[in-house]
Image (cartoon, rainbow, N blue to C red):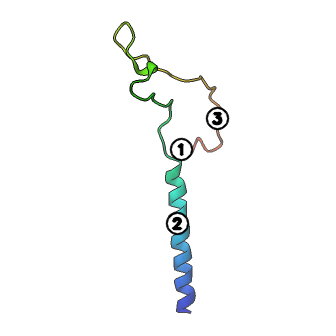
Amino acid sequence: MSRALSRLCRTFALTLALGGALALGGCGVKGPLEPPPGSPQAQPGPDGKVPKDTGPVKPKTPFILDGLL
């Protein structure tokens, strides 16, 4: 009986660890990538400011789980 309980605990811990890894793998910063330093896009313009690339505009499409987030 103790062996079955140990195996169940190990399976539960592994499932919890994999679930946590998948949840953290979805984390990130929303937005366009930053250009590397020294690239033409990172050079300041004539007004002295670096132009901001906002990337392509995507329409907002609702997702079924948005209410939970």
x then y, percent, for residue 3:
54, 90
Marked residue nearer the N-terminal end (3 or 1): 3
Residue 69 badge: 1
Q: Secondary structure at mark 3?
A: loop
The amino acid pointed to by label 2 is Leu
Give how far apart the Cα atoms at labels 2 and 3 are: 29 Å
Name the residue at 45% across, 27% down: 35
x then y, percent, for residue 16:
52, 66
Q: Counting other residues with Cα less than 10 Å from the Cα at mark 1, is it few (<14), some (14-19), or many (20 or more)?
A: few
> Between residues 61 and 44, which one lies in front from this camera angle?
44
Residue 16 badge: 2
Give how far apart the Cα atoms at labels 3 and 1 are: 12 Å
Residue 11 badge: none
Task: Answer whether labels 2 and 1 touch (C-beta < 8 Å).
Answer: no
**For residue 62, side relative to residue 26 (left or right):** right
Q: Is residue 58 above or below residue 62?
A: above
> Between residues 50 and 66, which one lies in front from this camera angle?
50
x then y, percent, for residue 2:
52, 91
Name the residue at 64% across, 35% down: 62
The amino acid pointed to by label 1 is Leu
Give how far apart the Cα atoms at labels 2 and 1 are: 21 Å
Q: Secondary structure at mark 2?
A: helix
> Between residues 64 and 41, which one lies in front from this camera angle?
41
Name the residue at 64% across, 26% down: 59
Give the labeled residue for mark 3: 62
